[in-house]
Amino acid sequence: MVRDITQRKKVETALISSRERFNKAFRASPAPTLISTITDGCYLDVNNSALTLLGYTREEMLNHTVDELSIWENYDDRAPLVARLIKEGSIKDELITIRNKNGELKETLWSCEIIQLNNEDVMLSLLLDITDRKRIEEALRASEQRLMEIIDFLPIATMAIDRKGSIIAWNRAMEEMTGVKAKDMMGKGDYEYALPFYGKRRPIMLDLILKPDKEYERQYGIIIQKQNDLLVAESEVPFLKGERAFLWGKASPLNDSTGNIVGAIESLIDITARRRQDTILKSREKELALKTEELQDLNAALRVLLRQKEDDRKELEGTIVSNVKLLIQPYIDKLKHHTNSKGLAYVDILESNLNDIVSPFIQKLSLKCLNLTNKEMQIANLIKEEKTTKEISEILNISESSINVHRYHIRKKLGLTNTQNLRFYLSSLS
């Protein structure tokens, strides 16, 4: 009999020690923890973390039910969960909405199980407040939605994939470029996004963001420029709407709020028309270069012809001068000895005019004064020969006043001022 009492004492001592350890763990737990009856949810004990979460004092909660305190946002949601608890013995991470003393709603994960307390079944509940996390997740989802809307309305064809290679964005401009609708592409993986461009499944530029591969770059001959974490490329694709096309693209990583890469995004511009224009332009430039070379050869030939013509002209002038001296000048010299004084004057004029014909004076004067009359040219020549007005009058058999009028017209046509000497100017043209 003594042995039985000793054994019972040991059991009671162990139970007391176990309860003390449980109470210490219960009080010190950072997780909001509550003990309540199963049916009506009357609170038997709550720890400090639960009081902080709910905003009540211990006295305000103990011996009061969840219904009396309006802890659940919708009390009717509790009954089916309690039925499940009784059936299964525990519930893990059930999302419920609770209300604190101030009426604020909290999103929580509720885990509970049935335990024995004083030989009765009670409910041990743990609450995990995920209100802030949910708010952040909702804000992130809203931000992602806005990003997708922005991408969708971009005028440049744009697509994006996650780290698994599944399409998460395929905007309207991409639909127009490829003829593939977003609903037929979203969520697709296994290089599905390459089919509209290459007609087969294969990596494209945004895959190089997630898995850099120099061998791939060389294999496909993509012109790639690396700008920090960006890739810029210009390449030919064989299958865009069944035709070959040239595309310019830029790809970059997609990062989350902590900077981790969660995917990649790529934008494309169809530059086929520009490349065709470049080809046409290069062809025309080549043709122009050939024509320029032909023109240069032609100009060289023309310069040779002009030099030949100039040489011919000089030869002709030399021939004329030689013929005048050989065929005309001897007879003029003879006339000087067989005429009177008046005839001698005519001979001098004849000789002078012949000299003018073979000299550059008449040519220069003609070019300078294309609007001089023959009479004015004649008088200008005599003035240059230092003939006076009276002598010119006698030679040409016209009045001195007429000579003066002609002198006035000559000066005006030559654009001479009153201070410029007419004879000096005419002599300068020789």
Image (cartoon, helix red, strand yellow):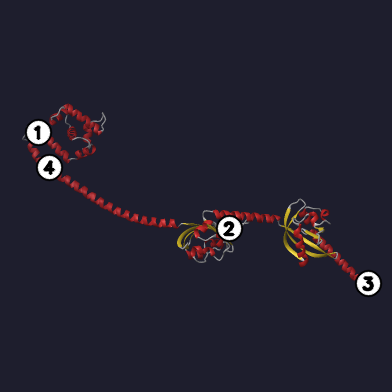
Mark 4 and mark 1 residues within 8 Å of each other at the beta carbon: no
Identify the secondary structure beneath mark 4. helix
Q: Amino acid at mark 4?
A: Lys
**Which residue is disc 3 drawn over?**
2
**Which residue is disc 4 drawn over?**
325
Count every numbered label the image shows and give the total.
Answer: 4
**Which residue is disc 1 drawn over?**
344
Q: First in sequence: mark 1 or mark 3?
A: 3
Q: Amino acid at mark 2?
A: Leu
Q: Look at 30% across and 55% down and name the residue there.
A: 294
Q: Amino acid at mark 1?
A: Leu
Residue furthest to the left: 338
Q: First in sequence: mark 2 or mark 3?
A: 3
Mark 4 and mark 2 residues within 8 Å of each other at the beta carbon: no
Task: Tell me, yes or no, if residue 231 can be seen here.
Answer: no
Nearer mark to the viewer, of 2 and 3:
2
Distance from the alpha carbon under mark 1 to that under mark 3: 186 Å
